[in-house]
Each structure stands twice: as structure tokens, then as C-alpha cells.
Image (cartoon, coloured by chain):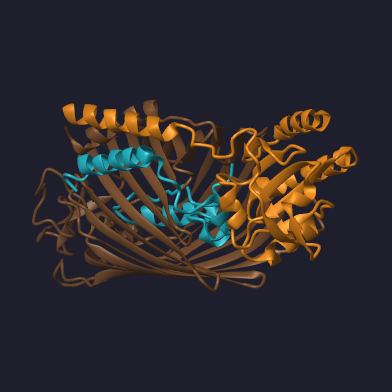
Amino acid sequence: MKRLTPPLFMMLAAALLLGGCGRIEPWVKPYEREHLADPIMSFNPNPVSSSYIDHVFESREGARGATGAVGGGCGCN
Amino acid sequence: MTRGASLRRWSSLALLLAAATVQSAVLPEDRADVLYHRYDGGGITIQGPSVLVRKKLGESYSVSGNYYVDAISSASIDVVTQASPYKEKRTQYSLGTDLLHGKTTYSAGFITSTENDYDAQTAFASISQDLFGDLTTISFGYTRGWDVVGMRDNPDFNEPTDRRNWTLGISQVLTRNMLMGLNVETSESEGFLNNPYRQVRYADPAEPQGYSLQKERYPHTRTGNAAALQLKYYLPWRAALDGNYRYYDDTWGIRAHTARLGYTHPWRSWTFDGHVRHYTQNAADFYSDLFPYYNAQNFLARDRELATFNSLTLGAMATWQLNTSRFGWIQRGTLNLSWDHLHISYDDYRDLRVETPTPGSEPLYTLDANVMQFFISIWF
Amino acid sequence: MKHIASMAALLTVGLGVAAAAPVDPLRNGAPAPAFELQSAAGAAVNLADYRGQVVLLNFWASWCGPCRTEMPILEQLHRQYRARGFTLVGVNVEPNPADALKALQKTPVSFPILFDTASTVSRLYHVQGMPNTVILDRKGNVRFVHRGYKPGDENAYLDQIRALIRE
């Protein structure tokens, strides 16, 4: 984990740059997202429940964090 | 530069640089959830409600509020070593707001949590951006907490703790059927980080049971790093598989691995969920179940949360789609029941309720707990 | 510090380039790509059938929240201006028409619904967001393109339809 931070952000910056260069067309078109928009594909469909269970584990374990997720879905608007 | 410091610099820079385009994303849906939660295990029961309401105000703004209670009763193994006696209640209120502008969502909120010997105030803010035809979402978050640790019978005891967290999240659509999420979080705490009641034990031949107790002593700072990778896959018969792995380590010497596998299967008006979670950690540097003598180290801990252990959780959830046609203002609703069985086996934490002639030969402690959740959700 | 500065520079360039609007092949005045699709009514419908009318093509899907919100407003537009030489045409982009028909049962509409099950028309029209609205004039040329839907967008549709009707 010592050297994780700088290479991670280099990857992130590279990904962003590559994404901009040549205007890579999204390989999953907006009209092809029916599976991704399905509620069963949501990262966090029940926030009350997942925040509770995260709390159950966090109060009994030494590890904490990196439990959130945003994104996926229908990509509308 | 420390790991925490470099992530700090990066997060603040990114916040300044995140660009908004002319197109837009969507705010979270309006909803209300009422949950009853119940934990039974290790001789304690913790139960209470959690109520969440989220509503859009106009087209760019969404507000959410949560009310949560933990009502704790009965004795836990910690009581034997004079940790906090148990019959207490923790109440938590939180308020959050989300502002949507183009493809950027700005979120901020506040959480306040109180119990009779601990007060925690937390403020959080985050920014989330959709990129590349909405295939990628990047988010940065910052959380700041101000805690005050108290003692039940000692009103003059008020020790502060400061918390700071930085998070980075990237979610990526990989294919029509697969999503990936990456989360990185650095957490820093500073101040009074131990439990004012809890004690460690050290070998003491003068005592009949062979050991004596001493107040625990923790470092004043703790920095932890966590990185998690999540994958979600849509199966052709309309089901979802998801896998998650998280690595954690911190300046107290704890290293932990979490792996979770879940399966979601809808069937008519039902949706069934099953999951298994495996967690392992090794003890903090200054942890010991039995110290050799009084003041054996600068820092002393016997908190099982900092011990070496592994845990396995098996869980399932059933969701029933409600018929909400009678109420025109409700779009849809669900009734949910979930049950998790948690089993923890400790490698270096012993069960002191069992008296043995030699201290340090008590059986290793194992914990079995059942967690139940029952909740109703409506979207309007 | 050098590390951070170079990464910051990379990020700025990356985001800046990414933030540029995508190239629009459906330029103002270009003839709308021709197509023929099956309609919900049963018969095959050709875009050329609507030559002489102002057409609003709306690409939608049952799984898209903003699309469902937009439906009743589109129905209103269709009813209001039908007599004056305007028609609304809904193009459903889902591979399985059954899902679309279920959604239409909840919000029935009187304008024609076409099924683009193979996504050929979506590709032709370079649909880059859901929902996607393309407004054609009486000669069958593309005049306005709208990506996404936010309440209030219908005011722009109204102005543009009225202007095209008067031409």
C-alpha cells in the first residue's frame, strides 16, 4: 500500500487523458443500457440497509472505509 | 510526504479542476424507507429504527434526512473486563443535500450522533462527475468529524477526537452487462481514541486469578488506508452477480482483507438476494490478550476489535413488490426482510468468563450473531 | 510537489478535452436519414410517410426515467398541434417490444410508436443520450436536436414546432 497513491492517480490522469484524446465514442451506447438501468444492477439499491450493515461491521472490525459507490445506471440526461 | 498528505493534496486539486459539460445526469430518486434493525449476539441485543426520506425540491436539488437509533441492552463479554455497562441508547440524525448542475452533482450534509457518554458531529461534502458518455463517474469526498468522549459517572471527563476522511470513487461501465467500481479512502483520527472504561490484563502471580487489570493506552493518532474493487455482472436470465474485495491497513499495524460475493435473483413479484462475506485481520501492534507485567509497553490494548480474527457472514434477503396502485402518488413500493449470520473466531482474544488455573489458557473467544432487518420502501 | 503538479496538469488537459461537446453529424438543414420500422399499430411505417408535416422524433425506453416523465408532455404536444400539420413519432429503442408495451399501458399515447429493436435507427441518428429528440421540418430535414429531458425543455419544443409550422 506504500506506493499505491501516486501510481493510482497517474492511472486516473492517464485514463482521463485517453478518454479525451480522439474523442473515443462510448462503447456502450445510451440506448444499449437497459441491463445497466435494471434496479438489480444498482450498486446500492437500499441505502438504509447497506449503511446499517456497514455500521455493524465497522463497529466490530478494525478496517473502515471504501464502502461507497456511485454510478452505473441508465446514464440518462 | 505521507500517504495521507498526498491524497489530501490530490483531492483538493481535483475538486477545483472538475469540469461540468453542457449535458446533465440525474438526481437520486425520491423515496422513504422505514427500517427496523436487530442485532443479537455475544450476549447483547441492539435494535432500533432507521428512517430515511429523500425528496427533490425543484429539478436541481434533492434533500435527504435520516433518523437512526441503536438501543443496546444486556451484558457483553467486555463487561467482564470493566468496559461500559450496557443499557444505553444512541440516537443519530443526519441531513444531506444534493445539487445537480450539468453532469456534476455536489453533495453536502451533516450527521449528529449522541449517547450518554459519546457525542459525534460529522460534516461531509462530495462532488461527483459523469464523463465519457456517462460510462464513467468520478467522485471525491471529504468528511470532517468532531467527537467528544465522555464517561458516565465522571462529568469532568470530556476528551475530544478529530476525524478526517478523504474518499475517491470511480465507477466504470465495462460492457452492456458489467459495471466496475473502485473506491479508495484515507481516514485520519486524532485525540482520545480508546475506550475510557476498557482495561487490559497483565500476568500477576499475586492475584488469585493470575492476572490484574490496567487501563488501556492508545496512540493519539491513527491513519488508515482502504482500497476496494467491486464488479457487478448481469446474467442472461435476468439476475445479477456481484463481487467485492477490500484491502485495509493502518498506522496501528492492522492489515485486513474483505471479500464479498452476492447474487440477486428476481422472480415474479419477488427479488431474492444471497451473499457471503469473509473478513480477516491481524492484530494491532500494541494489542495483547495478556501482557507479561504492568506497563509492559507504551501503548496497551485488549480490544477485540484490534485482535487477530477472521469472520464469515452468510446472509439472505427477500423483497416483495407491493401493489401501490391504490395510492396514486406512490410510484412503487417494496417490503424487505433480511437475515445475516455473523461468525467471528478470534486467534488471540480469550474468553475470560471461563476461569482457568493459568491465565492465557482460557478458550479463544468465538462470536455468533444474527442480524435482522425488516423494512418498507416507497418511491414517489 | 513536482509529482502533484504534473498530475494536476494531466488532469486539467484530460478533463478539458473530455469536456468538449461531441461532434454532431445531424447538422441543421441536413436531410433526416431515411428508415422504415414496425409500429405498435402493426403496419410498417416509413419516415417518408410524414413528408409535408413537421415531425418530432422522440427516442425513448421504458427503463429511462426522464423518458417516462416526458411522455405525457409529448402526448399533449401531439394533440395540440396535430391539426396544424405536426406529428409526434415515438421510437422505442428496446430489443424487446414487450417492455415498451407494458410502459405504454401505464401512460397511453395517441401518437405512433415505432420499434427500433435492432438499434439501426438509433445508430443512424447518432443517439447520444436518453431520451433523444430530433425535430424535422416539412421537407424532411433535421432542424433541432435535444439530448436528455428536463422539465421545462418542452417550452423550447413548443417554440421550435410553432416556428416550423409557420414556414
Tell me: residue C81, above or below residue B176.
above
Percent of width and height locating residue B316: 50, 70
Foreground: B190 or B128? B128
Q: Quadrant of residue B142?
A: top left
Tell me: residue B253, above or below residue B349.
above
The chain coloured orange in the image:
C
Total label count? 0
Percent of width and height locating residue B313: 39, 68
Q: Residue furthest right?
A: C83
Percent of width and height locating residue B149: 36, 37
Foreground: B317 or B222? B317
* In the displayed structure image, the side of residue B366 where residue B110 appears, left or right: right
Tell me: residue B91, above or below residue B266.
above
* In the displayed structure image, the side of residue B88 where residue C107 appears, left or right: right
The chain coloured cyan in the image:
A
Foreground: B297 or B238? B238
Q: Quadrant where the C terminus of chain C lies?
A: top right
Instruction: Give the residue displayed 46% in from the left and 41% down from the top.
Output: B116
For chain B, the rendered hue is brown
Foreground: A49 or B181? B181
Instruction: Give the residue displayed 52% in from the left and 57% down from the top.
Output: A36
* In the displayed structure image, the side of residue B132 where residue B159 appears, left or right: left
Q: Quadrant where the N terminus of chain C lies?
A: top left
Q: Quadrant of residue C35?
A: bottom right
Whether residue A59 is visible, yes or no, is: no
Instruction: Give the residue displayed 37% in from the left and 38% down from the top.
Output: A20
Q: Quadrant of residue A60?
A: bottom left
Whether residue B90 is visible, yes or no, is: yes
Percent of width and height locating residue A77: 59, 41
* In the displayed structure image, the side of residue B212 where residue B236 appears, left or right: right
